[in-house]
């Protein structure tokens, strides 16, 4: 099986063939940015992009996404510079413990790719399935608004 | 034990620890809680060639304590903060430090660190790079970092943020070692308080699973009264399939029903049976007159709900003389307690156990015991390979410990607009003397003094002449233990809800009623501050003729005798009883503020917890244990349900006190009081139920 992750092809061999995408990414490939929070599709910590769509890696058999374009949090800043969402996250000092944050950043990136200027309801809807026990949600909102402005500038300049 | 530091190009500390006697497992390891000295703090520092390293002596779990301590070190050493690299210590890098609990990181650690840094700065300035240095403690006012705003205005780059937003490995489960396998300890699906053990299982079926490595039977795989069965696999997903294939049959001693837990703590039953055993205050009350209020409150069992499940990676090597040596990665609030428990359980020298601190994906009191660490170490020893062990979400709920339920009765008598008699009785389960860490007979012994965790937050922040505050704790068949702020959140919710009811009876404004009962200048200041920000004194608009009912509530508190907090909540309640917190304002005074953004973040976090506590959180029970296996059954608040939050920090020169739990004293009651304002329904059982809020209207 071959997986295309962050613009690199990986050959996946036994005993990893029947594993979820989450375990293959984290344990076979060492891309530990996406997290195991529940393994039940209920927390969002494992979120990655599959062909630009946010997906819960804990529920996806790796087989099901063989050959698709997979982007993890490590792949958002590929050329050494952060994407606007990551930068906005730093500017607003969003993370507390940090455990949920990769999933939220990936989801927010997908939101802004889809909707350049999301309103408050659209932000809440996109992040509703992302649990954060530290209570960073107020800052998540601010960071996404800030990133939207940065994206705007980036595309218009 | 050595408490000296030697300058040898590097400032460091070689630490040798006496071996913990092993072989007497009946007596649990008691956590040691020494307050750090300045000499200890010198051992957190290393220096070479103008570069410094600071081993962060506190568990990093989102409170950014490393940032706060680095600010202090930078100011005191007189170097820019980026010259100080933060490092997470192992138990062999630094002297024993106490657990990261109770919001006292800045309070107890800042001063020793400042003294140590001042000493090091002077030694280096004198050109001393060799020999022993000792801390000469200097008066507080000579410490640069202890001056108001000395550290708060310092710009510190938070390099941890960069690591987090780019997905760098920081957590225990992110660690990997060559040859590593994955482990799990299966347990009967009942509370660990009940005796349980595996009876039989389908070994042959498990062996056929791709990735099967081993089944481990080991009597030490015991947590409380639960004896587990270990499984090992070459991939994490195979653990699920092995667990299924094994279909273990369990023997369980006894059973219990959820109703028995309600009955065991029912405050009215306890009061009917006589006095409670412990008291915070025990004044003689006026026994004759009628009570102005007489209210009952019940707060349910609730989970910590940290998003990171407990995880550990354990690995055995050999010492030069051939003794087994354990290295273990984990995210714990109590590095040295974990080390001691591992040494005891595995009969190792404490010297031969190295516990490496990792960042915690949320602590909240859940990481104060040694649970997953023992399981990982035992499996690693059994298979003689590195073992990574991550609890499943279901294990977090079923095998962890939780905020215990509590049951309260509050009576107060008001004369001429002031409370003259106050009587609060509460029964909960143990918190500091958690059953998850001690058997019944030890709990009985220590409980003679009363579990102060249960009582925390029950003291009144007001001048009330006669007070009786009594409490008791009963051992329940489900495990309670430390949870953010211990008893603070439930107790303060009850106290400040009752105070609100008193203000209503007295016909007073909730703010004026409170101000009239305190001479505490700092508490007065946060009350006035939050009232200003929220426009409390402005003319209140009428309820809109249609649409959701609006309400506004206030509460305040003093956390552990230090930080002062006041919160105003605005809520909306729909006709069907769905409640939404629209805005929370908070004014907070924790004395000298070292890291303002970190303090704000902690307050925001507490307030989000309070929204959850009032509106959604409860951990459901079933026969003999916890019913929840996921967040679906044990919810935490989601983004769309969360309010705008406005925090005002009242900075002062008072000694720094905590911020990680302080807002738990006021958030929940402010929200509950706002619900009452909107609907006339006083939330007396949490979480507040929509059917009650819908029915009620004034
Ligand atoms: S780990 Fe995938 S949703 Fe929680
Ligand atoms: S930052 Fe800790 S769970 Fe979100």
Image (spheres, rainbow, N blue to C red):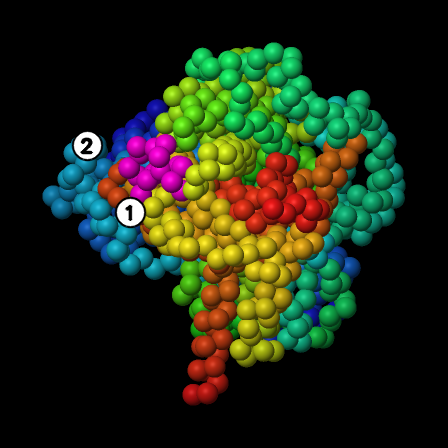
Give the image quarter of residue B111.
top left
The chain containing the residue under callout 2 comes to B
Is B517 left or right of B152, judged from the image as shown? right
Q: Which residue is mark 2?
A: B137
Asked whether A85 or B17 is in front, the reply is: A85
Asked whether B442 or B215 is in front, the reply is: B442
Q: Residue at x 31, y 57 (%)?
A: B156
Q: Quadrant of the N terminus of chain B?
A: top left
Asked whether A15 or B663 is in front, the reply is: B663
Marks 2 and 1 on same chain: yes
Boundaries of the magenta span: B511-525
Q: Percent from the top left, x then y, of residue B72?
A: 27, 46
Is B345 located above or below residue B629 in the figure? above
Asked if residue B661 can be seen in this view, the reply is: no
For the residues marked 2 and 1, what is the alpha-carbon distance in whole angstroms? Answer: 26 Å
Secondary structure category for the residue under label 2: loop
Q: Dot 2: within a 10 Å radius of its alpha carbon, few (fewer than 14), some, or many (20 or more) residues?
A: some
Q: Dot 1: within a 10 Å radius of its alpha carbon, few (fewer than 14), some, or many (20 or more) residues?
A: some
Is residue B541 a member of the stretch shown in magenta? no
The chain containing the residue under callout 1 comes to B
Dividing the image into four equal quarters, which quarter contains ligand 1?
bottom right
Is B149 located above or below residue B132 in the figure? below
Secondary structure category for the residue under label 1: loop
Disc 2, ligand 2: is the CB inside 8 Å? no
Q: Nearer the viewer, mark 2 or mark 1?
A: 1
Q: Disc number at residue B345? A: none
Q: Which residue is mark 1?
A: B651
Give the image quarter of residue B390.
top right
């Amino acid at each position: 099986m071959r997986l295309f992750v962050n613009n690199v092809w990986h050959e996946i061999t036994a005993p990893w063939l029947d594993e979820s995408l989450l375990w293959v990414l984290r344990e076979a490939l060492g891309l530990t940015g996406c997290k195991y929070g529940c393994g039940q599709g209920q927390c969002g910590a494992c979120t990655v992009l599959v062909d630009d769509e946010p997906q819960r890696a804990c529920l996806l058999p790796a087989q099901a996404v063989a050959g698709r374009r997979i982007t993890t949090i490590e792949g958002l800043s590929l050329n050494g510079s952060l994407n606007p969402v990551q930068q906005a996250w730093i500017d607003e000092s969003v993370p507390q413990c940090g455990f949920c944050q990769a999933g939220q950043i990936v989801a927010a990136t997908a939101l802004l790719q889809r909707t350049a200027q999301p309103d408050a309801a659209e932000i809440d809807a996109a992040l509703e399935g992302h649990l954060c026990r530290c209570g960073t949600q107020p800052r998540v909102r601010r960071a996404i608004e800030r990133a939207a402005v940065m994206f705007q500038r980036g595309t218009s300049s | 034990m050595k408490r000296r530091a030697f300058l040898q190009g590097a400032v460091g500390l070689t630490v040798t620890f006496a071996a913990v006697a092993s072989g007497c497992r009946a007596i649990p390891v008691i956590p040691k809680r020494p307050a750090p000295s300045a000499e200890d703090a010198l051992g957190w520092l290393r220096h070479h060639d103008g570069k410094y390293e600071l081993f962060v002596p506190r568990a990093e779990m989102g409170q950014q304590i490393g940032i706060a301590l680095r600010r202090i070190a930078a100011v005191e050493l007189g170097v820019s903060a980026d010259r100080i690299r933060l490092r997470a210590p192992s138990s062999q890098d630094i002297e024993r430090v106490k657990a990261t609990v109770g919001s006292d990181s800045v309070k107890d650690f800042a001063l020793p660190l400042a003294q140590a840094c001042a000493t090091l700065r002077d030694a280096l300035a004198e050109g001393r790079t060799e020999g022993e240095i000792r801390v000469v403690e200097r008066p507080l006012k000579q410490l640069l970092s202890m001056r108001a705003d000395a550290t708060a205005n310092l710009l510190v780059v938070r390099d941890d943020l960069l690591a987090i937003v780019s997905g760098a490995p920081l957590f225990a489960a992110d660690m990997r070692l060559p040859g590593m396998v994955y482990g799990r300890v299966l347990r009967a699906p009942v509370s660990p308080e009940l005796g349980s053990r595996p009876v039989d299982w389908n070994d042959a079926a498990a062996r056929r699973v791709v990735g099967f490595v081993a089944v481990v039977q080991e009597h030490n795989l015991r947590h409380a009264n639960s004896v587990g069965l270990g499984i090992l696999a070459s991939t994490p997903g195979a653990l699920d399939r092995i667990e299924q294939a094994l279909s273990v049959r369990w023997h369980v001693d006894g059973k219990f029903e959820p109703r028995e837990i309600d009955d065991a703590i029912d405050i009215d039953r306890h009061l009917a049976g006589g006095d409670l055993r412990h008291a915070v205050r025990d004044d003689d009350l006026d026994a004759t007159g009628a009570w102005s209020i007489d209210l009952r409150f019940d707060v349910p069992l609730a989970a910590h709900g940290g998003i990171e499940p407990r995880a550990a990676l354990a690995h055995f090597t050999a010492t030069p003389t051939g003794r087994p040596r354990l290295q273990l990665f984990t995210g714990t609030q109590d590095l040295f307690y974990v080390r001691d428990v591992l040494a005891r359980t595995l009969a190792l020298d404490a010297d031969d156990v190295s516990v490496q601190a990792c960042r915690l994906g949320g602590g909240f009191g859940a990481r104060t015991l040694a649970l997953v660490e023992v399981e990982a170490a035992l499996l690693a020893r059994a298979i003689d390979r590195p073992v990574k062990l991550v609890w499943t979400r279901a294990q977090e709920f079923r095998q962890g410990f939780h905020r215990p339920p509590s049951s309260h009765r509050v009576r107060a008598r008001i004369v001429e607009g002031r409370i003259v008699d106050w009587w609060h009785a509460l029964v909960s389960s143990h918190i500091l003397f958690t059953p998850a860490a001690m058997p019944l007979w030890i709990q009985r012994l220590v409980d003679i003094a009363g579990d102060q965790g249960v009582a925390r937050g029950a003291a009144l922040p007001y001048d009330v002449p006669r007070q009786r505050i009594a409490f008791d704790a009963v051992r329940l068949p489900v495990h309670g233990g430390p949870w953010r702020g211990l008893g603070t959140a439930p107790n303060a919710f009850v106290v400040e809800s009752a105070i609100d009811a008193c203000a209503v009876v007295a016909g007073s404004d909730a703010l004026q009623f409170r101000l009239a009962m305190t001479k505490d200048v700092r508490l007065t200041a946060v009350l006035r501050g939050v009232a200003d920000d929220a426009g409390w004194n402005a003319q209140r608009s009428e309820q809109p003729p249609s649409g959701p009912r609006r309400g506004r509530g206030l509460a305040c508190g003093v956390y552990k005798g230090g930080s002062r907090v006041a919160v105003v909540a605005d809520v909306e309640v729909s006709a069907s009883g769905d409640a939404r917190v629209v805005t929370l304002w908070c004014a907070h005074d924790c004395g000298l503020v070292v890291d303002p953004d970190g303090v704000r973040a902690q307050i925001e976090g507490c307030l989000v917890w309070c929204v959850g506590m009032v509106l959604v959180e409860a951990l459901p029970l079933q026969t003999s244990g916890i019913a929840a296996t996921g967040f679906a059954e044990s919810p935490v608040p989601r983004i769309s349900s969360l309010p705008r939050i406005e925090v005002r920090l009242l900075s002062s020169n008072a000694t720094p006190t905590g911020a990680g739990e302080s807002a738990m004293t006021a958030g929940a009651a402010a929200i509950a009081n706002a619900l009452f304002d909107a609907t006339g329904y006083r939330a007396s059982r949490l979480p507040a139920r929509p059917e009650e809020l819908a029915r009620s209207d004034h």
